[in-house]
């Protein structure tokens, strides 16, 4: 039975990027995982097929070889140490390898012995402003690839071990001569690891990794700001066949608060007050981010946008004992839905008011009058 196209197995197009490939792999691996499909031989076979497809396409060298030669690229016939088929017949490919060799392509690809570092992961975490004020330890569930316990991450069936790659002889590199050039490239059979698995693990399909969800504790320090990134070393995706794990990056976002807006360590709060309170003076209570409350006194004649500063009532400064301030901005609310009696009282007040009661309005309209008079001249 012929193998299905690897792109078809993962359900992606041939121009899919790395992120799309990884997302498709995780979805398919979760769907056909043996733990979710016990005693289902067909699901187990599909799980192995998905792992084989992703293992080939996630590696740039393997993917390039597969795109060019198909499944034949991994059957040991694409050129050995002496330079067989697939080398001497394509000068453009050889020149591409030469550029890879001199401009960074060969330096980090292919590691003899079988260990490739796992990918870094990102987790978006939302926290409340109160938790950012006091600090908190939260638990998160992270879906990721972990080292296969059945094979201890080797990818080989328990009781067996990887064997030396027959194509490269264990070096992870193969050479070919093209005219005056001797070109070295990553072995497409073993992906530069120097080893191949002839009897893969039934659980992980030879990748040395399984998809699972882990619960981790994350410390949210007091004073943390929106957009802060927390790095958890070694908590990312497990490496291939026992390789080192990647890192997990927690991106923190603060949820909008009902009262406060934050600017660094300072907090801002807009408080509406009645027209009479603003005119006659008064006081009101406002909440504080630590769960308490504080009283604000409003002096007689307070205007809209008047700001009161409460020292030390803001957020902690990260990794410091300092605290920011809280600013209360007054918004004078004009009364609406007046009763007949209220209207009469306001009309009476208006009839006896003077410029001294509304100095800003009087000054503004005096300037407007002068402006139009000057236009007339």
Image (tube, helix red, strand yellow):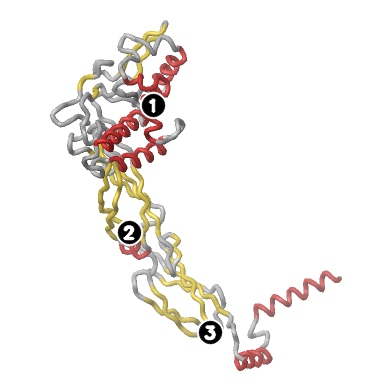
Q: Which mark is residue 63?
A: 1
Point 35% across, 42% down: residue: 27
**Among the two numbered marks 2 and 3 on one chain, the one whose residue lies closer to the N terminus:** 3
Q: Residue furthest top?
A: 179
Residue 244 seen from this side: no
Question: 272 or 81: nearer the eye?
Answer: 81
Residue 371 seen from this side: yes
Alpha carbon distance from label 3 to label 1: 76 Å
Residue 219 relative to residue 314: left or right:
left
Residue 249 relative to residue 340: left or right:
left
Say what secondary structure mark 1 lies in. Answer: helix
Asked if disc 2 and disc 1 are in contact, CB closer than 8 Å, the reply is no
Alpha carbon distance from label 2 to label 3: 38 Å
In this view, the mark in front (3 or 1): 1
Tell me the residue that label 2 is attached to: 320
Percent from the top left, x then y, of residue 272? Answer: 51, 77
Tell me the residue that label 3 is attached to: 300
**Among the two numbered marks 3 and 1 on one chain, the one whose residue lies closer to the N terminus:** 1
């Amino acid at each position: 039975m012929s193998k299905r196209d690897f792109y078809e197995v993962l359900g992606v197009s041939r121009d899919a990027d790395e992120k799309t490939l990884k997302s498709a792999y995780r979805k398919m691996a979760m769907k056909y995982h043996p733990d979710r499909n016990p005693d289902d031989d067909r699901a187990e076979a599909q799980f192995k097929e998905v792992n084989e497809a992703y293992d080939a396409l996630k590696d740039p060298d393997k993917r390039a070889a597969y795109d060019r030669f198909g499944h034949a690229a991994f059957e040991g016939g694409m050129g050995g140490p002496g330079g067989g088929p697939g080398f001497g017949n394509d000068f453009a490919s050889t020149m591409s390898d030469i550029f890879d060799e001199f401009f960074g392509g060969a330096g980090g690809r292919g590691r003899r012995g079988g260990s490739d570092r796992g990918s870094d992961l990102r987790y978006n975490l939302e926290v409340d402003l109160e938790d950012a004020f006091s600090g908190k330890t939260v638990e998160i569930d992270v879906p990721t690839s972990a080292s296969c316990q059945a094979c201890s991450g080797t990818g080989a069936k328990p009781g067996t071990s990887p064997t030396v790659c027959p194509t490269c002889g264990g070096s992870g590199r193969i050479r070919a001569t093209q005219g005056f050039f001797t070109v070295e490239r990553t072995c497409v059979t073993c992906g530069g690891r120097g080893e191949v698995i002839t009897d893969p693990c039934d659980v992980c399909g030879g990748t040395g990794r399984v998809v699972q969800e882990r619960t981790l504790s994350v410390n949210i320090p007091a004073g943390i700001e929106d957009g802060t990134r927390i790095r958890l070393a070694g908590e990312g995706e497990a490496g291939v066949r026992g390789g080192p794990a990647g890192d997990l990056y927690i991106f923190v976002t603060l949820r909008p608060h009902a009262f406060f807006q934050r600017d660094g360590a300072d907090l801002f709060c807009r408080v509406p007050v009645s027209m009479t309170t603003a005119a006659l003076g008064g006081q009101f209570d406002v909440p504080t981010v630590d769960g308490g409350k504080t009283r604000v006194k409003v002096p007689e004649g307070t205007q809209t946008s008047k700001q009161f500063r409460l020292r030390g009532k803001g957020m902690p400064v990260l990794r410091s004992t300092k605290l920011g301030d809280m600013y209360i901005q007054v918004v004078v609310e004009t009364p609406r839905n007046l009763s007949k009696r209220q209207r009469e009282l306001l009309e009476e007040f208006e009839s006896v008011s003077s410029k001294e009661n509304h100095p800003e309005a009087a000054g503004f309209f005096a300037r407007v009058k002068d402006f139009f008079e000057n236009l007339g001249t």
